[in-house]
Amino acid sequence: MFRILKKRRLAYGTHDFWVEAPEVAQHAQPGQFVVVRIHQYGERIPLTIADSADDAIRLVVKAVGKTTYELCSLKEGDELADVVGPLGHPSEMGKFGHVMMVGGGVGIAAIYPIAKKLKDHGNRVTVILGGRTAEQVIMRDEFRFADRILITTDDGSLGIKGVVTDAMKKVLEEDTVDVAWAIGPTIMMKFCALLAKEYALKIWTSLNPIMVDGTGMCGACRVTVGGEIKFACVDGPEFDGRLVDWDELLKRLTIYQKEEKEALEKYLKKVGEPSWL
Amino acid sequence: MAVKIQPNKTPMKEQEPEVRIKNFNEVALGYTEEEAVKEAERCLQCRVPMCVKGCPVQIDIPAFIREIRNRNFEKAAEIIKRYNNLPAICGRVCPQENQCEATCVVGKMKDHEPVAIGRLERFVADWEAENVGLKLPKLPDKRPQKVAVIGAGPGGITCAADLAKMGYEVTIFEAFHEPGGVLIYGIPEFRLPKKIVKREMDYIRALGVNIVTDVVVGRSITMQEILDEYDAVYIGIGAGAPKFMGIPGTNLIGVFSASEILTRVNLMRAYDFPNYDTPVKKGSKVMVVGAGNVAMDAARTALRLGAKEVTIVYRRSEKEMPARIEEYHHALEEGIKFKWLTQPVRYIGDENGKLVAVECIKMELGEPDASGRRRPIPIEGSNFIMEVDMAIEAIGQGPQKILLQNFPELKLNKWGYIEVDPETCATNIPGVYAGGDIVTGAATVIEAMGAGKRAAKAIHEYLSSKVIGHKT
Ligand SMILES: Cc1cc2nc3c(=O)[nH]c(=O)nc-3n(C[C@H](O)[C@H](O)[C@H](O)COP(=O)(O)OP(=O)(O)OC[C@H]3O[C@@H](n4cnc5c(N)ncnc54)[C@H](O)[C@@H]3O)c2cc1C
Ligand SMILES: Cc1cc2nc3c(=O)[nH]c(=O)nc-3n(C[C@H](O)[C@H](O)[C@H](O)COP(=O)(O)OP(=O)(O)OC[C@H]3O[C@@H](n4cnc5c(N)ncnc54)[C@H](O)[C@@H]3O)c2cc1C
Ligand code: SF4
Ligand code: FES
């Protein structure tokens, strides 16, 4: 069993966990993820490793459906049935020069360890963080190591009023960028990739298809990259966003929409108002 | 012995097809004691038992059948267990028609079916579980050496059990949250109830084997760390990575690998959604591609999930079909349709990316290919459309790469499987052994078990010689 050591709320519906998982913690590298199953009736869901220290890993979870709602309801001291990982290839590391790190929503947590390590490698790091509102721009104090931080909000409550691609454009017009990362909602990553293509910029995106095992044994996570079928869990999760078939991925994310709705409704009927979110 | 032999096998009770297609309970219900004794009496007790030659682990078949005849069921179980750690499983899933029953002398007689060796094996194992319970052998003194087994499939658990019985400290590392390999995540409940697999896992644990789940070797722990900590290693990671034909439209919504459907249903219990959280798509008109055990299991699973019509398409003919014959018969009884000599060439989707039809082409058989089977050749211009809302590919699996990428020193063969000495299962790295599907490619439970047994013996010899080496 994997114990929740620390937990706090970062924003409405987004919670920050430190979970005891010694093997994972000792081997985790930026860009990798775990598969979590809350209890014996639970689904296996993938979550990015946002950080690791000693015997614990950090997970930042946004409540979007049954499993993530329930996960966010757990408390310090509670245990998760399964945490498997670290899975997927680590992010490509090295000294590239100027790197642009774009995080949207809960994707900010996924960008964090990669940006930190890139900084350690001696890169100049520009960070762009986006959210719908100021509250949703999570973890922004933790990016102090960055050379430059730009913030965007849909409602203009913080930083630039607009979306992350607006900030990307600004940086790309003012400066040369050697390589970029963009992690967030699929639709955001799609537009970041389209923009990067215009500037002939390599942009790593972390794909989030539906997964089951996370170890290459089912093919649920298949995506098309550069015209080829890839299994995101073992061939990725990061791919050059310019080569990804985004529309196919967006469609594939809807496969279980009906069942997801049913599961969440049934759960909320059982537990009542999700006041903990 | 001039007794007259019943020409047919004693029938085994089964759930009626119209009932069983609505549930996931086991189809075949097993023999009673009377039925088992009756079937045992069909055995000639050959002095040169051909059946044993057909058995991959050479169980002394006439000996255990003799004990059934004498109603010494416990003794019968003891005999089988000398050769086979998992008889309740093998009795249910072995392709007996290609093994012991293929060579059985009775089956060679005109108009006679062979002795139902598989059913008898199953009977004995179930009888023992019900009437005797868990019986641990006397374990020898602990030996100082530690062995790591990677993968808790039939091969890994057999190897672990044999080594534990010799006194070694054994740890199994398993990637999934439940041990059992294909027995848990692949073969459906209606063929192999999971409680039987769990019973075997309890036995392995009772032998002192430490089963650690949620560990993906190559990621959660590296091969180097394992080599540093353990005196020997057995790799039994199976061949679970699904292959796709790669035809246009493969990523449409509604196209799945059999592995995904079966994993959702078996490992994650998606047939009981939403009591279990994992969903599975229920097709209405379903096509399954391939005609092996995996295809049969996927087709019959789709039917039980509520499909109106399930059709298996196979590019060769009925004769080349690799599935276990009993599963084929069960599938036919359940109303699964078969389209032989047919190959999908393109998936067709609607504007939402959902599968609506599959374009297929008809095939004919040409000259024999490398596998000795006649090669299927497309018939030009014979294309036709089948309307389906779900397509499940069951065309084979390959090696899962995570461990192999983490251990590049390991020698592989040209198909990407681990190369071993077939006698000992030794790889090119001293102290590292491998067996089962990761060596042979997708094969059978009994072959994986056989490899686990041979490897355990070889590991014991290797570790014994090392100890002596240390002392001198
Ligand atoms: C490699 C990887 C890393 C991820 N890392 C994180 C993370 O660090 N933090 C986090 O909060 N989430 C992360 N996700 C997404 C997370 O796995 C899903 O949100 C989760 O599985 C939803 O489960 P649920 O039962 O709560 O919701 P469901 O009921 O399954 O889904 C509810 C809604 O979420 C959408 N959804 C379902 N699965 C996914 C998915 N995999 N990605 C995006 N949307 C999805 C559905 O389309 C639906 O609209 C990651 C996904 C992947 C593949
Ligand atoms: C649907 C289906 C039906 C079948 N039906 C039959 C049948 O009726 N009769 C028959 O004889 N055979 C059948 N087979 C074939 C049979 O199941 C296999 O040949 C047999 O299970 C192989 O055993 P194994 O020990 O090599 O590995 P597996 O059973 O494949 O087990 C390997 C285990 O290793 C784990 N693993 C993989 N990688 C790692 C890693 N890096 N770290 C840790 N663990 C890892 C896997 O999770 C898995 O649990 C069927 C197969 C399938 C898929
Ligand atoms: S070959 Fe058939 S008849 Fe002869 S011993 Fe074996 S099971 Fe009995
Ligand atoms: S999640 Fe199963 S293959 Fe990627």
Image: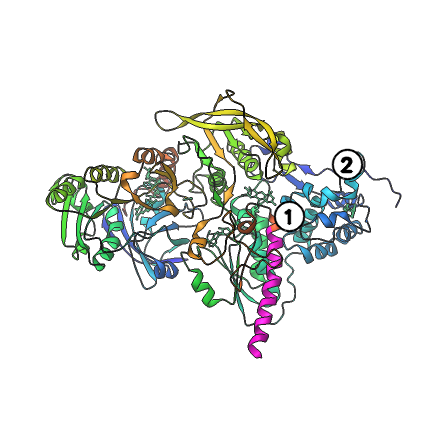
| SS assignment for the magenta stretch, majority | helix
How crowded pointer 1 is (Cα within 10 Å; few <14, some 14-19, many 20+) is rated as: many
Chain letter of the residue carrying label 2: B
Farthest-out residue, front:
B367
State yes or no: residue B455 in magenta: yes
- The quarter of the rendered structure image containing the C terminus of chain B is bottom right
Q: Which residue is mark 1?
A: B90
Residue type pointed to by label 1: Cys
- Residue A27 lies, in percent from the top left, at 36, 59
One can see residue B335 in this view? no
* SS under mark 1: helix
Instruction: Indicate left or right for A123 with B225 as reference.
Output: left
Report the residue at 65% width, 53% height from top. B129
- Residue B48 lies, in percent from the top left, at 80, 51
Chain letter of the residue carrying label 1: B
State yes or no: residue B87 in magenta: no
Q: Quadrant of residue B159?
A: bottom right
Classify mark 1 as within 8 Å of ligand 2 or not, answering yes or no. yes
Between residues A168 and B433, which one lies in front from this camera angle? B433
Q: Are marks 2 and 1 on the same chain?
A: yes
- Residue B126 lies, in percent from the top left, at 66, 49
Q: Which segment did they paint magenta?
A: B448-472
Tell me which numbered mark, 2 or 1, is placed earlier along the sequence.
2
Using the image, tell me which numbered label, if any, was put on residue B134: none
Q: Are marks 2 and 1 in contact (CB under 8 Å)?
A: no
Between residues A245 and B75, which one lies in front from this camera angle? A245
Q: CA distance from mark 2 to mark 1?
A: 22 Å
Q: Which residue is mark 2?
A: B8
Between residues A218 and A2, which one lies in front from this camera angle? A218
Residue type pointed to by label 2: Asn
Farthest-out residue, bottom:
B472
